[in-house]
Image (cartoon, grey):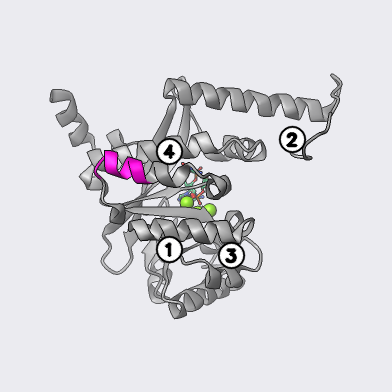
Amino acid sequence: KGQGRNQVHCFTSDDKESDEFQSNMQWIHILHYALENDHLEMHYQPVVDIKTQEIAYYEALVRLNVEGKLIYPNEFIPTLEKFDDMNLLDHHVVNCALKDLANYPELKRIAINLSAQAFRDKRLLPLIEGTLKTFNVEPQRVIFELTESASLSNLSATQNMIERLSDLGCDFSIDDFGTGFSTFAYLKNLPADTVKIDGSFVKEMLHNKIDLALVKAICEVAGALNKKTVAEFVESEAILDLLSDINVDYAQGYFLGKPQALSVLFPLKEDNLSLA
Ligand code: C2E
Ligand code: MG
Ligand code: MG
Ligand code: MG
C-alpha cells in the first residue's frame, strides 16, 4: 500500500519484507482487537507553569494494556501510520480523553496528541465538536498537539483544521519542535498558541552548548511571535532552573511527574467513585 495503488507485490517465506509485513499485520490486528475490547488506557502527565510552579494542564498519552503489561505508543503508532490506520485510534483517544476531562475537574485542562492523518480526516472535527457537547466540556479546557513533521506534509489542510479548532475555542500546540524541516517557516504559517521544544534538546542543555543555544533561539523566536513555550523531558531540578532563567513558560518531564493512570493520580476520587 505504501508503494502506491494498482500494484501487486509477491512475498516468499524467506523474505525479510514478508516478516516485517507479518509483524505489521499483527500490530494492526492487536490494535483493532484492543479498540473493540477496551484494552487501551490513557495516562496523564502534568505540565507545570514554571513561574507559579502550579500544574497548568496534563498531556494525555495512550497505552495498550495487554494482560496487565503496558505497551507504549512508539511501538505501535509507526505501524498504524505506515498503513494509514491512525483514524480509529485518534477517534478513540478524543472520546476517552474528553470523557476523562468531564469526569475529573482535577485535570483542569488536557492536551491531546493527534496523528498526521488527523488533518486529512473529515470526520474528526465533527467528532471533536460532538464529543465536547456530549460530555459538556468547555473547549477552552482542550489543547491539541501535533508534531511538527506531521504538519509539514499538508500545510493548508493543517492550517484549516487548526483555525476551525481555534474557532471552537481549543488551543493548538506544535509538538517536538526543532526536529522537522524548515521549522521556522512553519512557526510563521501555523496559527499555534504554544511551541513544545523537543525533549532531545532539553535533556542535554546543561552539558551541551549547542542544545542550549537552540533552546534559547526557539524561545526567542516563539516569544517574538507571541507564542508560549513548553519544554519536554525535564528530568532534573537543574534543567528546570535553567529553563526558568531563559523564560520558558511551561515544563514537563519525569522530574515533575511521570505519566500515570487517573486511579494513581487521583486515588481518593477512585474511592469516592467506588463508594457511590
Ligand atoms: P510526545 O507527544 O512528544 O509525548 C512525550 C513523550 O515523552 C511521552 O512518551 C512521555 O511519556 C515521554 N516523556 C515525558 N517526560 C519524559 C522525560 O522526562 N524523559 C523522557 N525520556 N521521556 C519523557 P510516550 O507516552 O511513550 O509517547 C510517545 C509519543 O507517541 C508521543 O510523543 C506522541 O507523539 C505519541 N502519542 C502518545 N499518545 C498518543 C495518542 O493518544 N495519540 C497520538 N496520535 N499519538 C500519541
Ligand atoms: Mg505530545
Ligand atoms: Mg513532544
Ligand atoms: Mg517528543
| Residue ID at (62%, 59%) | 152
- Residue 230 is tagged as 1
- N-term mark: 4 or 1: 4
Dot 1: element: strand
Q: Is mark 4 within 8 Å of ligand 1?
A: yes
Along the viewing direction, whichever of 145 and 196 lies nearer the viewer: 145
The quarter of the picture where the C terminus appears is top left
Q: Main secondary structure of the magenta part?
A: helix
Label 2 Cα crowd, 10 Å radius (few <14 / some 14-19 / many 20+): few
Foreground mark, 4 or 1, reads 4
From the image, tell me which residue sits under label 4: 93
Disc 1 Cβ-to-ligand 3 distance below 8 Å:
no
| Residue 36 point in image, percent of width and height | 46, 22
Q: Which residue is mark 3?
A: 178
Residue 37 placement, left or right of 106: right
- Amino acid residing under circle 1: Val
SS at badge 3: loop
Q: Nearer the viewer, residue 113 or 59?
A: 113
- Amino acid type indicated by mark 3: Gly
Q: Secondary structure at mark 2?
A: loop
Q: Earlier in the sequence, mark 2 or mark 3?
A: 2
The magenta stretch is 129-136
Q: CA distance from mark 4 to mark 2?
A: 25 Å
Residue 269: within the magenta? Answer: no
Disc 1 crowd rating (10 Å Cα; few below 14, some 14-19, many 20+) is: many
Q: Is 139 drawn above or below residue 275 in the view shown? A: below
Inter-mark Cα distance, 1 to 2:
37 Å
